[in-house]
Image (cartoon, coloured by chain):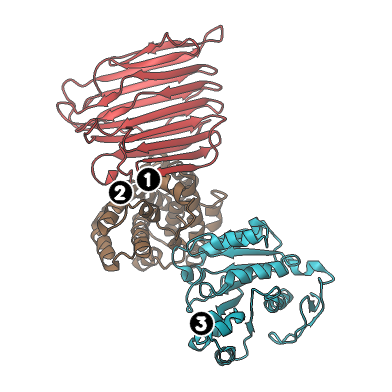
Amino acid sequence: MTTATLLLLADSRFPTGAHAHSAGVEASHGRGDVRTVADLATFIDGRLLTTAPTDAAFAAAACAQPHQWGELDHELAIRTPSPRLRTVSRSLGRQLLRGAERAWPATPGATLRGLHPEGPMQPIALGAVAAAAGLTPHDAALCTLHHLVGAVTTAAVRLAGFDPFEVHALAARLGPRLDALAATAAAQAHDAPALLPATTSLLADILAEHHTTWEVRLFAS
Amino acid sequence: MAPVPLPTGYWPSWPSGRPAESTVHARTELEVGLDHTGRSVLQRMHCEVPLVVRVDTHCTDVLSLLVVNAAAGPLSGDVFELSLVVHDGASVRVRSVGANLVQPGPNGGQSATTTTVRVGEGARLDWELEPTVSVRGSHHRALTSIDAATTATVRFVDAVALGRFNEPGGLLSLRQRLTVGGRAVLDHATEFGPGAAMGPGAHGDMRHICSTVIVSDDAPVAASSDVRPTLLAGVFPLAERCALMVVTARSLV
Amino acid sequence: MPPDHVPGQPHDHTRDGHTHGHHDGLPDDATWAFGSPGTRPLRIGIGGPVGSGKTALVASLCRLLAQQVSTVVVTNDIFTTEDAEALRRMAVLPDDRIAPVETGACPHTAIRDDISANLDAVEQLEALHAPVALTLLESGGDNLTAIFSRALVDRQIFVIDVAGGDKVPRKGGPGVTTADLLVINKTDLAPLVRADLGVMDRDAKARRGTLPIEFTSLVAPDGARAVADWVLAQLAQWQAG
C-alpha cells in the first residue's frame, strides 16, 4: 500500500513552488469571471473539460512509460500553444524535481532535467516522480487533478476572500468526478504519446499571456 | 516530399451514432504543382459532391481554388474528406463560397470533416475558407492535419461561428495538428457546446473563433495578447517560423 | 585568505568574534570578494514589515558594495514588480542582476515553507553572473512572524523602523529575536513619532543578547555604511570557510 506516499505527493505543503500559481484564476478574476463560488465551480468544470484531461493523461503516461519521456514531453508541449504556460509548466516541473529528489532518491532528476533546457513539463515530472515513489499511473493522474482543484480553491480564497468552508465543500463534491477522470487518464497511460488527449482552453492560453503583462499581480500565473 | 504518417489510430473511427439512410461520404483530392513553365497549376482534382472545387479564373496572379458546397451540409452522419497536396515550389490560394453550415440531420449522430494538407519545400499555401457555422442541434467533428516542409510557407485560417444569429450552436469538436519539417509543432483540440465549455475555465462565452496557423519567415516570434470585454486574441509562437494566432469574439457586429 | 580590512567609516565593534581595522577606499586586491572557486555566494536575506526600508537598504548596500563585490539581487514583491523596478530605476545594479519572484499572496511561504521558486531564481542569477560573491534576497513586506529558511539564505537581516512603534522590539518575534542583524531604521523620525530609541535599544538587546543591532537613517547619504561593513565582515568570514 502506498497511500501515505500518495498523500505526501498530493499534499499542497510539499514544496514545489506551486503555491505561487493560481491555475489562471487570477487572470479570470481580473476579467470579473470568478466572483462567486458558483462561478468558481463553473471555472473548474471548464478546466476539467479542457486542460485537466490532457495533463492527467500525460502524467499517467509518464508514470507508465519512462522510455517515452522525451516524446511525452514534446507532445504535451505542442498541446500548449501559450509560450508563457509552457515556461510556467517547465519551471514547476523543475521545482518539483528539487523536492522529489530528496524525498524519493530514486527520482532520475538528471534525466528529467535533460528533456529540455528549461526543465520537463510539470505533468511529465509528476508522473516520473510518482513512478520513482512507487505510485501508479492512476495515482499520478489523481495527483494532477487534486493539485489543480487545490490551486484553484486556494487562489480564490487568497484573491477574493472566498469562504474557505464553501470552497472546500465544492472540492469535496468534485471527488467522484476526479476519480472518474483519473480512471480515464489511467486507461490511456499506455497509449502512444501522439494519441493522448489534446484538449486546451482558449481562455487559459490567451489570458496567461495577458496576465504576464499585468503590473499588479499576486500570482506568477 | 514524403508525408509524415500519423500514428495508427490518430483519427478515431467516427462518426458515432447510427448512420442515417442518406448519409454522404465525400472525398475530394487536389494536387497542385508546377508545370513545365514554372507556373502553379492544378495537376489533379477528384471531386465528390458536395465538396466541389473550382479554379477561380478571375484570379490571374496566383492559382486560386474555390471550394463550393454544392449542397447543404454536412448533416449528421456525413463524412467529408478534403485532401490537398502542394508540391515543391508551387503556390495556391484556397477560398470558399458561402459559410459552411453544419446542421443536424434526421437521425442525429455526428458528422465529420477531415482536412489533410501537405505543403512541399518552397511551396506556398494561403487557405481561408468561410466560417463553419455550428447550427443548434448539430454534432460535428472537424480534424485538420497540416504537414509542411521546412521551407514551406503556410497561412491556414480556420474560422467557426457557434450558432446562427441569435441562436445557440451545437456540439463542435475541432482538432488541428501541425507538423513542420517532419516535427510536430502544434496539436490542439477545442470542444464547443453548451455548459461549462463556454465558461471561464474553458473558452468563455465567445461565439466566433478564428485561428490562423502561420508557417513563414515572418512568423511572429513574440507572444502577445489583446483582452477586451467582447474580444480576446492571442499570438503564440510555436517553433521557428511557426505561430498560432487566435481571435475570439462575442459577436462580429 | 582575504585581507583583514574593509572600506568604511571609522567604527569599532566586534562581529562574531572578529575585529577588523579599516581604511578608506578599495582593498588592495579588489578581486578578493569575487569568491574563490568552490565557494558558493553568500546569501543574505532581508526581511521585515512593509515600509520599514528593506528596498532602501538593498539599494544602499548595492551602491556601497557592488563596485567591489559581485552582487545579485532577488526581490519578492508581494503584488507588483515595484521593488525590482525601483531598484532598477535607482541604477544601483545592472538590470539583469535584479530578478523579481512572485509569491502568490504568501510572501512568508516563499522564503520559508516552500522556497523552490526563490532557490530557482537565486541559482539562475548566480549561474548567469558567475562568479558572484553576494546574493541579496529581499522578502515581500510581511509581518513580524516571517523568517527565512536556512536552506535559502546564510544570514538574515531584519529591518524594522521607528515609525512602526517603539514597542516592536519588546513584542519580539523570530525576526527581531533571531536575525543575524537587526536594523532599526528611520531614526530621524523618532522625535516625530515619539519613539524612544533608548527603549528600543534596551528591549532589543533583551531579546537578542549579544546579536548585533544597528540603528540607521537610510535617508542619510552614508546611512547604510554600518550595515555594509557588517555584510563585508560576514563575507570575509564566509569566504574563509
Residue A21 in view: yes
Question: Which of the chains is cyan?
Answer: C
Q: Quadrant of residue A156?
A: bottom left
The chain under label 2 reads A
Q: Which mark is residue C174?
A: 3
Tell me the crowding category of disc 3: few under 14, some 14 to 19, or many 20 or more residues within 10 angstroms, Cα based.
some
Residue closest to the far right: C28
Contact (Cβ within 8 Å) of mark 1 with mark 2: yes
Identify the element where label 2 is drawn. helix
Amino acid under disc 3: Pro
Q: Position of residue A133 (x, y in %)?
A: 43, 62
Contact (Cβ within 8 Å) of mark 3 with mark 1: no
Amino acid under disc 1: Leu
Please state if C104 lies on the left or on the right of A184 as rendered: right
Query: Where is mark 2, residue-wise?
Result: A46
Colour chain B appears in: red
Question: Which of the chains is brown?
Answer: A
